[in-house]
Image (cartoon, rainbow, N blue to C red):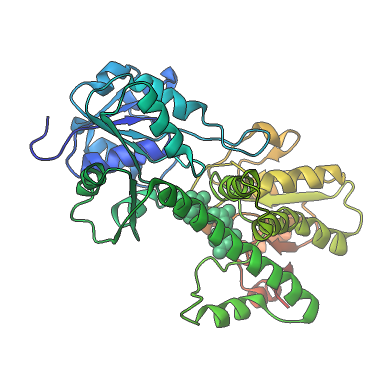
Amino acid sequence: MNGEKPPLGIFGAGWVGLVTGACFAALGHDVVVRDVVTKRIDDLNAGRLPFHEPGLAELIERNQDRLTFTLDVSELKTGTDIFFACVDTPPTPSGDADLTYVWSVIDDLGDPGHATLVMKSTVPVGTGEKIRATLDQRGLEGVAYVSNPEFLSEGRAVEDFMAPDRIVIGALEEGAGDRVAALYEGFDAPVVRTSIASAEMIKLAANAFLATRISFINEIANVSEAVGANVDDVAYGMGLDKRIGTKYLNPGIGYGGSCFPKDVSFLKLLAGNSGYHFQLVSAVIEVNDLQKRRVVTKLQQRLGDLRGKRIALLGLAFKPNTDDMREAPSLVLAARLQAEGAEVHAWDPLVTGHPDLDGVAIAPSLLDAVRDADAAVIVTEWAELRDLASTEVRESMRTPLIVDGRNLLDPEAVRAAGFQYEGIGRA
Ligand code: UDX
């Protein structure tokens, strides 16, 4: 036990659970992280992280004296009365959230007596109310329930945890909210105290709004192409308006990842299930789906029939600095290109394979990927691709065509280096 800082129990050794656990350990809490997957716990105990997240391995290593990884729920429950639920809520085939793991947490919690259960997992609005009702039915009135959504972004999750824009705490009982707020004492961030439903909604609304910005700028990019404007200048000029801001206005081949696609869909279905047709988020989803395919049209315009053409996809992860392939636009793009008869080669600094990349040749290096290619497509804006327009790359390609799906490169410099260039929304 650790002096003033209360020990914490975390359900789920996934990305949210490990970042949360490691960061609270770094803040001085003793933390027990429990998962049901034996291999995951074995790996963690052997010092292996199940995914790539900058700074996390070092943080775990530095705070190993305060971190325990276990399969044993009783070890989790010993010595603490504050529990975080950091379990996966994947989409079901209907697009709704699968809350199986959340309900397992409630079951595994059993009767901890007087305790606080803090929900970090993203759940549909109304879940907290259902959990409260279940706890009450089970005679667990002593377990307070608090919604404390995470706003961590992959690749910078430790930073996001330690320096958040805000801390959202939704609680029924003020005392329980105070308890969770105390865990964040010393953080230089506004604390939003609200109802459980509002806290749940803040998470969904924030992600849906960011996704809306991305789909919006992608449509502006598409129109810019048609009318001869340059979306980079448009986004910059728009973003300087303080009411708008410059962030999340980078056009590209669409958003992916474990959060935006899922949360936008959760919000759409949540509205629909409550009898409201949320038109705007439906459009955001549709624009994003179509955006992933626009690159195929661009390639067809340049190369004609893609049958037998060799296309190099550069970057596979849904964004740089992660190996996460969930909802990665590269998966849709690779499948579309294969459907058109193209021969797809790919390279990513971290991703070396994926079950949905059947038939895609994963190259061991960037140069291997672009060799004899008819086009190189920048799918993920990895820093490693900034120097793509090199003589070596140009000479090894069959056609020196770069389709820049993330507007990563300077078009003039690329053309001056002897390449054909096509970006997104760049006149
Ligand atoms: C996001 C939110 O940022 C985070 O607050 C939330 O908790 C989880 O979802 P993450 O999924 O890690 O985090 O990625 P983020 O960096 O936000 O990017 C999401 C997707 O949007 C990526 O595919 C990215 O390439 C794309 N994107 C982002 C754009 O296409 N344009 C932009 O301007 C910004």
Q: Is residue 71 above or below residue 123?
A: above
Does 344 sit left or right of 85 as displayed?
Answer: right
- Residue 355: horizontal and vertical position, in percent? 66, 31
Quadrant holding the C terminus:
bottom right
Q: Residue 419: in sight, yes or no?
A: no
- Residue 122: horizontal and vertical position, in percent? 47, 42
Residue depicted at x 61% and y 81%:
233
Q: Residue 69: in sight, yes or no?
A: yes
Residue depicted at x 58% and y 49%:
267
Residue depicted at x 55% and y 52%:
319
Does 342 sit left or right of 41 as displayed?
Answer: right
Residue depicted at x 73% and y 55%:
286
Does 214 sit left or right of 173 as displayed?
Answer: right
- Count up the numbered dots: 0
| Residue closest to the eye, 260 or 153 | 260
- Residue 398: horizontal and vertical position, in percent? 80, 56
